[in-house]
Image: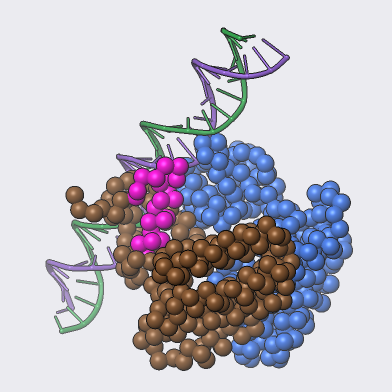
Chain colours: A blue, B brown, C green, D purple
Amino acid sequence: MTSDPQVPAQHGRTLTEQVMDYVRSAVISGELKTDTLYSVYQLADRLKISRSPVRDGLLRLEEAGLIEFARNRGFRIIPTQPKDVAEIFSLRLALEVPAAFRAAQACTPQIAAQLNEIVGGLSRCAEAELTEEFFDLDQQLHDFILEVAQSNRGRNIVNRLRVATRLLGVSTAGKQRTLSDIMVEHEPIITAISSGNAPAAALAMRQHLVATGKLLLAQAVQGQGLDLDPENLWTELTAGY
Amino acid sequence: MTSDPQVPAQHGRTLTEQVMDYVRSAVISGELKTDTLYSVYQLADRLKISRSPVRDGLLRLEEAGLIEFARNRGFRIIPTQPKDVAEIFSLRLALEVPAAFRAAQACTPQIAAQLNEIVGGLSRCAEAELTEEFFDLDQQLHDFILEVAQSNRGRNIVNRLRVATRLLGVSTAGKQRTLSDIMVEHEPIITAISSGNAPAAALAMRQHLVATGKLLLAQAVQGQGLDLDPENLWTELTAGY
DNA sequence: CTCATCAGAGTAACATGTTACACACTGTTT
DNA sequence: AAACAGTGTGTAACATGTTACTCTGATGAG
């Protein structure tokens, strides 16, 4: 049998959730493209399951803003434009900078230990050039900071924004920035949070997000073959944050 | 026939959307309570439609964080705690203050005219004591500011947060604050945006949201019969924003 | 009285059948 | 050639059937 993109029959997870996972990763891998109409029938066939869980999962993804339904025609992946990148990072600035501030205030020795553990993992992955694992840990770190800041709704929102970012198919780890470079940006954040220095934590988080956001924006602009100036666009779209 | 809470057979809207509307308003009106398990069967029966659109709508509401499913047991309304109120207003501060800043930068005479139109409506509703219409317009105003600030994802998020707030069953228009009082808070925001004064717009929006948030938090604490100090709680939970 | 077992009710999750609609395509008229 | 009516295909939306699970509450053993 050829390699069917079958949902990997995980136990405990519903088929609906597995469909959501599948669609998200298929979009990231480029298997599902924007500007193409797909149908629930096709996808159910492809995954060898019935239309119900497929439709259920897609409805939730629509609610999350990843896809949209065209009545009686199918559904399509919602494209992510350069200006979306700027907006996403505006929002992340708005949410994560204050979160870093509050995480520093709420930091206990135990939390500091957990932070160091994650950073240790990041270090190892950076040295070994394990890109995938590195980004998983990076995600964990940001999520943990939101958690410490007691911002549960914020966590949810940021996680969603992160998925949208990945749809660009761009990664921050291009030739312009090595994993070690990104590591260096993270260290001041951790140091500041661990030592309870809230303003410093906020500042470090801001710098990290601005650096990442600008880089992604530039790549997105370039990727679309636009001749806009990313720097101007960034300034214009993130004013006030 | 007794007054069935039937979905009002609107055209153009899908049954799924009507179910979502119904559940949202039923929660606000107190018809659906927290800590009670309801089922798709019951609700479909009640609304005289099949289980599919009910389930579809509920799945989307779960994605939005309004309800949660308990496998093979039913679904329940997710309660909104006082700390949620603080978190929601933290997020709104994070999103709407910068949005006001940028709206002021992006303001054109045409936009100013539209803002004035909404404010005019608010004025009329305040005088006539039309609470419901007043809050609709208030919502429109906040939404419009996000729109002008070109923050589409932000709009979506804030709209969702607003629904969660309403679940408390508390209204800002208690005895402590009349509609006219709220009007007064809005005016400096509009004036600053219309005149393109970005920092003033941000400040005015901040003051408005802080005032509203503190009031709602106090009501929520009181409503739950807790003896916490709302002022301390507010300061603690919104640090950094 | 306490605890384990088990049958039954009720449910979400999943499968499949049905309907009404949007759109492309064809052939016809002007 | 261009505009238009008719027709067929594929789809989301909706309805209904089926399955496997979770809890409750009764029953009986220790």
Q: Which residue: 54% across, 64% down?
A: B120
- Residue C17: image quadrant is top left
In the rendered image, the quadrant that contains the C terminus of chain B is bottom right
Disc tally is 0
Residue D27 screen position, x and y as percent:
12, 66
Which span of residues is magenta-colored?
B7-27
- Front one among A46 and A9: A46
Residue A13 screen position, x and y as percent:
48, 58
Seen in the image, is B122 located left or right of residue A227?
left
Q: Main secondary structure of the magenta part?
A: helix
Residue A214 seen: yes
Residue A131 seen: no
Seen in the image, is B5 located left or right of residue A226?
left
Residue A185 screen position, x and y as percent:
80, 76
- Front one among C8 and B193: B193
Query: Is B13 included in the stretch rendered in magenta?
Result: yes
Q: Relative to A128, say whether A82 is above or below.
A: above
Q: Which residue: 84% across, 48% down?
A: A225
Residue B93 screen position, x and y as percent:
61, 75
Q: Which residue: 49% across, 46% down?
A: A55
- Residue A233: image quadrant is bottom right
- Front one among A87 and A116: A87
Query: Is A117 included in the stretch rendered in magenta?
Result: no
Q: Which residue: 78% across, 71% down?
A: A210
